[in-house]
Amino acid sequence: ATREGRVTHKLVPAAPQEMAWLQELLDGTFKHKTTRDGRGRRLAKRFVAVQALRSEHPALWDRYAQRRTQVAEERRSAPPGCLVAPNTANLAEGLTGRCRDDEGRNPANEALLFHGTNPAGALSILGTSFKIDAAGLAAGTMFGPGVYLAECSTKSDEYAQDDPEGANKGLFAMLLCRAVVGKPFVVEEPGNYATQVTSGEFDCVLGDREKAVGTYREFIFFHEASIYPEYVLFYRRDDEDGLSTRATTTCKFWARGYCKYGDKCRFAHAHSAPGAATTAAAGSTVTVVPAPTAIGAPTQHVMKPP
């Protein structure tokens, strides 16, 4: 906390269970479909979660919580069918369950959605959230000048980049955001639909290009308070031969407590903490996701989730 008593922004390394949930979201929303937004980049075979940080930003969280409460009150009596739930709602119950209240309801239609970017950009957004004024500077505005989030990891991967140098070299980045979807204005054709949301009639735009041309649905937001960037996820893109070119035998140094190569090691690092015992049949190999070691930020003290 500061001298004035304010709680500062913290980045907390994701726990092993959180890493498993994040991997479930990556896998469960993966679609074998590319669009022109991918700029010709070949679709990977799988996205492997390497590391993640959870953002605990009290000021941004309070702003988001107020918006969520407002939308929940406005949409509490909405007729069935007008609140369209993203595909992430049925995955990773440990994370998506946080979008529901104690009685299992979700009146604001809160959801978890992806946003692809680069590692440095992702860390910056965690500290400031999204800025509507900057909308479209990097990826265009098919449905209006808002913040574009996706329900599929493969769609956000089209915008994701890796850092050419530094600690995050070779790793791509996505943000996993809490978003107040509320009552979306559903459209299939491109156009500027911002006024449908800013007028208060709807809470976001759902650009349904999946129905129109068989690609993806995107959710576009025009209120900065409607989004809380909660996780930055650093991941590896495994191509068609990726799994065969990376050894899946557990690193013996990691098993003993420390590996100087970190996530760049040619052998696998188990989900459990360094030094933890692992069991496997003699001569067998085990496919695992690397352990969640924080990068891009110092180790932080753990706070209770918002």
Image: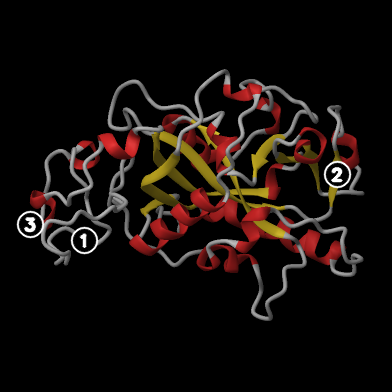
Side (left or right) of 176 relative to 205: left
Most distant residue in the front direction: 283
Q: Is residue 6 visible?
A: no
Question: Circle 3 sits in a helix, a strand or a loop, which is it?
Answer: helix
Q: Residues within 10 Å of mark 3 (few under 14, many from 20)?
A: few
Q: Vertical placement of 21 versus 214: above or below?
A: below
Kindly report the distance in space between the C-alpha atoms of the residues bearing marks 1 and 3: 10 Å
Kindly report the distance in space between the C-alpha atoms of the residues bearing marks 3 and 2: 54 Å
Mark drawn on residue 186: 2
Report the residue at 13% width, 52% height from top. 254
Q: Nearer the viewer, residue 294 or 157?
A: 157
The image quadrant of residue 131 is: top right
Residue denoted by label 1: 273
The kind of residue on which mark 1 rests is Ala
Kindly report the distance in space between the C-alpha atoms of the residues bearing marks 2 and 1: 45 Å
The image quadrant of residue 62 is: bottom right
The kind of residue on which mark 3 rests is Arg
Report the residue at 70% width, 32% height from top. 132
Q: Is residue 72 visible?
A: yes
Residue denoted by label 3: 256
Report the residue at 39% width, 44% height from top. 48
- Mark 2 vs 1: CB contact within 8 A: no
Question: Circle 2 sits in a helix, a strand or a loop, which is it?
Answer: strand
